[in-house]
Image (cartoon, rainbow, N blue to C red):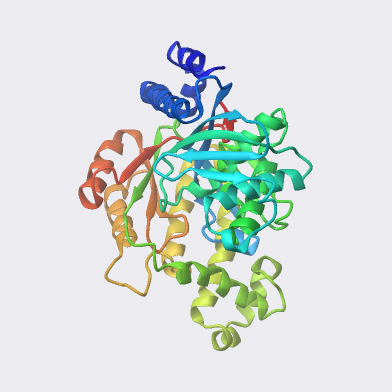
Amino acid sequence: MKPAELKAALLGGKFDDRLTCLYGAAALPAQKARYAAALESFEALYGADRDADFYSVAGRSELSGNHTDHNHGCVIAASIDLDIIAVAAKSEGNGIRVKSEGFREDVVDLETFAEPDPARRECSAALIAGMAAGFRKTGYRAGGFDAYTTSNVLKGSGISSSAAFEDMIGNILNHLYNGGRVDNVEIAKIAQYAENVFFGKPCGLMDQVACAVGGIVAIDFEDPKRPEIEKINFDITGAGYNLCIVNTGGNHADLTDDYASVPAEMKAVAAAFGKPVLRDVEESEVLAKIAELRSSVGDRAVLRALHFYAENRRVAKQKAALRAGDLSAFFENVVASGRSSFCYLQNVYTTKNTSEQGLSLALCLAERILAGKRAAWRVHGGGFAGTVQAFVPSGETDSFRAAMDAVFGKGACMVLRIRPVGAVRV
């Protein structure tokens, strides 16, 4: 539809059912205004006579499996109702233009940027080029389009803004050039390729899968090229709980070494047994050689390895609990995961600046507020700074949010829904 027709359809209620599915009925007026504003920005930039569509890709939340995927472990993740949206239209030739709200427009020529370019790494243009190259490499079509995007998947919040952007480029290419026939899992794999090869970041696949597939998903990375992905049909919101993410702030600028040390130390333990990752080493082998490992790789590496094994078992228990509708067992293991991350994985604060412990403080407050209730709390995402996660009874959510906002600033506590779909053309 032309932008004027699309806006009339939006404001006339044509998309109400779809938007309610994505965001909930209470958010419908705000989301309609958000989509209308994005459409107006697209029209101003790219013209009023284009055949355009709306697109959405979810952010994600890791529910279990903290720092396990990089050693071929297991995770549970979910798409959330914070998302990136786009208005996009096909264009002639091989030029892609993407204007993201608040950022400079990316202009990518798919003919001249068809291969990885070390000089153009670590920028959004590399992700765009990598997604198009990945589509063509996998046997799908890719070509030019213009898009305006806006996102409330906040950077540094542990809900995967970069993965959502990659999946969005794939989502648009899927519908404009492939008739929507590319499976969202395939889009996620291409997104990992784009980030690894073109962007230059050796990420795993969890974020891309969770953003693209939607709902709650359990992922087993024993074979990372062919991960086992299972949808888990459980409505946490319908069960009377809100998923709250608390952004504690903190400085992410000097944490690269902290993040890198986690997979590196786990892999160092595996290497002591001649294996590349911990999934290839039996826990009993590690336990039998702790004395030797203390000397060769250090105590923290051993603790992180033991966290890995216990966390994989917790994922299996939580998966079973959700399938059985046993929230008590699920929450018990959420809290256990958080304690293991704090004590053994040790990713709740950086030892470079022990005076700044926003995550520790948020976890302490969450425990004081929610202890004795059927609820749960844990570190969220990569850790060291950023966010914690809590499952809060609906009747307690307002007071929980007020308490967290009072400490970490207004809007620090985000109250989220797990949405049933990931990457979609609206």
Would residue 155 be found to the left or right of residue 203 on screen?
A: left
Q: Residue at x 66, y 81 (%)?
A: 272
Residue 222 visible somewhere in the drawing: yes
The quadrant holding residue 320 is top right
Q: Is residue 296 above or below residue 221?
A: below
* Percent coordinates x, y for residue 361 in the rendering: 28, 59
Residue 344 in sight from this viewpoint: no
The number of numbered badges drawn on the structure is: 0
Q: Is residue 189 above or below residue 152?
A: below
* Relative vertical location of residue 420 with respect to residue 153 in this rendering, above or below: above
Instruction: Specify the farthest residue to the right.
Output: 139
Whether residue 213 is situated above or below residue 249 in the rendered picture: above
Q: Kindly identify the residue that appears in the image at 50 percent across and 19 percent down.
A: 3
> As drawn, is 197 to the left or to the right of 67?
right
Q: Is residue 20 rendered to the left or right of residue 324?
A: left
- x, y (%) of residue 270? 65, 75
Residue 216 spot, x, y in % from top left: 56, 40
Q: Nearer the viewer, residue 167 or 320?
A: 167
Front residue of 36 and 81: 36
Residue 19 image position (x, y, % from top left): 48, 23
